[in-house]
Image: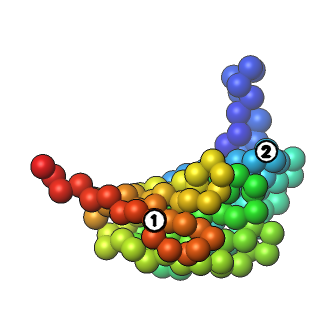
Amino acid sequence: MLWHLTEAKRALRFEGHTAEVCGVRFAPSGSLLASASRDGTVRFWMVNKKDESRVLRAHIGAGVRSLDFSPDGHSLATASDDMTVKVWSVQRQSLQQTITAHSNWVHSVRFSSDGRLLASCSDDKTLSIWDVGAKTSAHCFTDSGK
């Protein structure tokens, strides 16, 4: 749902996912909204066209827990129960890269403010930082519990 904050009422209701919605993000332009669901999909919604959406089958057979747009809005990162982070082209809705560094489901994913780095955290007690352009690990931090 999209709310009018000043009027404290619902502006739009978006329907389409077949399971719980775990996260939403506006693209930097503000005209596109993406929603992540346990149904394994991401839906892209044009906020001025409430009944129209595009479906990205992001993580088949596993829920999408988190998502984030790159600062330029050209890429979208998704984090999943399948222990991967995926980076997608928003315009082409095509997979750009898959990151397989975690040994348990991935809670969250975020781009850095310049879009060069991507951070992900997992139930395996790690925080991984990725260089998106080089497609390499920049850092990995582990919670040893001490």
- In the picture, measured across the screen, residue 139 lies left or right of residue 23, that is left
Q: What x and y, as percent, mark residue 15?
A: 69, 56
Q: Say which residue appears at 65% left-offset and 79% top-offset.
A: 95
Residue type for callout 1: Ala
Q: Quadrant of residue 110?
A: bottom right
Q: What x and y, as percent, mark residue 17?
A: 62, 62
Of 32 and 114, which appears nearest the observer?
A: 114
Q: What x and y, as percent, mark residue 51?
A: 81, 56
Q: Is residue 88 above or below residue 112?
A: below
Residue type for callout 2: Gly
Q: What x and y, as percent, mark residue 29?
A: 81, 47
Q: Quadrant of the N terminus?
A: top right
Residue 30 marker: 2
Residue occupying the far top of the picture: 6
Q: Say which residue appears at 43% left-offset and 77% top-offset.
A: 100
Q: Quadrant of residue 111?
A: bottom right
Residue 138 marker: 1
Q: Is residue 20 above or below residue 55?
A: above
Q: Is residue 30 visible?
A: yes
Residue 9 marker: none
Q: Say which residue appears at 82% left-offset and 53% top-offset.
A: 46
Q: Say which residue appears at 18% left-offset and 56% top-offset.
A: 144
Report how far apart the C-alphas of labels 2 and 1 lie in the structure: 30 Å
